[in-house]
Image (tube, grey):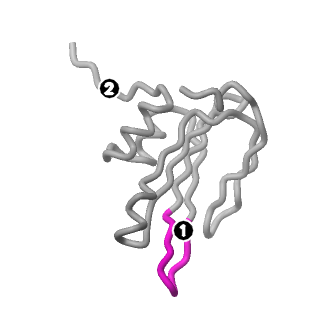
Amino acid sequence: MTDNNVVPAQFVALRDNDADIVFNGCLLGAIDNEDQADVTGRWIELSLHRTDGGKFICERARRTLKPGERDVYEAAVCDTTVEVTAFFGFGRMSKRLFNSAGLDTTVYIP
């Protein structure tokens, strides 16, 4: 985890076709694949926050540099890590985000 998660602040999670989410909390982790923009003109940004009340805020932004396209913003409020993984899935970027946030999403089998 980075020092970002130690400093509480107010954040705004943007959402298309829904109300934006304003909350006080800490950034747990954030990643992107902006290096893809050089090739495709598009990239994704993921971030995970924890609110002062203990909820998770999940954010995904699909960014573009292509003419005629616009950025797309999604966000969700989650109570559990199961809900967090349902929002992000288990793709490569998601697993990198979980790792950077210190979130254990491993399934243990006895």
Q: Which residue is drawn at 62% across and 69% down?
A: 17
Q: Name the residue under label 2.
A: 106
Q: Nearer the viewer, residue 29 or 16?
A: 29
Q: Residue at x 54, y 68 (%)?
A: 72
Q: Tell me: residue 43, above or below residue 9.
A: below
Q: Which of 35 and 86 is in front in this view?
A: 35
Residue 56 in the image: x percent, y percent?
59, 37
The Cα atoms of the two marked residues, 2 and 1, are separated by 29 Å
Q: Tell me: residue 54, above or below residue 43.
A: above
Numbered mark located on residue 72 in the image: 1
What SS does tag 1 mark?
strand
Q: Tell me: residue 26, above or below residue 12.
A: above
Q: Kindly identify the amino acid type of the residue bearing the numbered disc 1.
A: Val
Q: Main SS of the magenta segment?
A: loop
As drawn, the residue found furthest toward the left would be: 110
Disc 2 and disc 1 in contact, CB within 8 angstroms? no
As drawn, the residue found furthest toward the top would be: 110
- What's drawn in magenta, residue-wise? 62-72
Q: Tell me: residue 84, above or below residue 54.
A: below
Q: Quadrant of residue 3?
A: top right
Q: In which quarter of the image is the C terminus?
A: top left
**Left or right of residue 39: residue 76:** right
As drawn, the residue found furthest toward the bottom would be: 68
Q: Kindly identify the amino acid type of the residue bearing the numbered disc 2.
A: Thr
Magenta segment: does it hold 69? yes
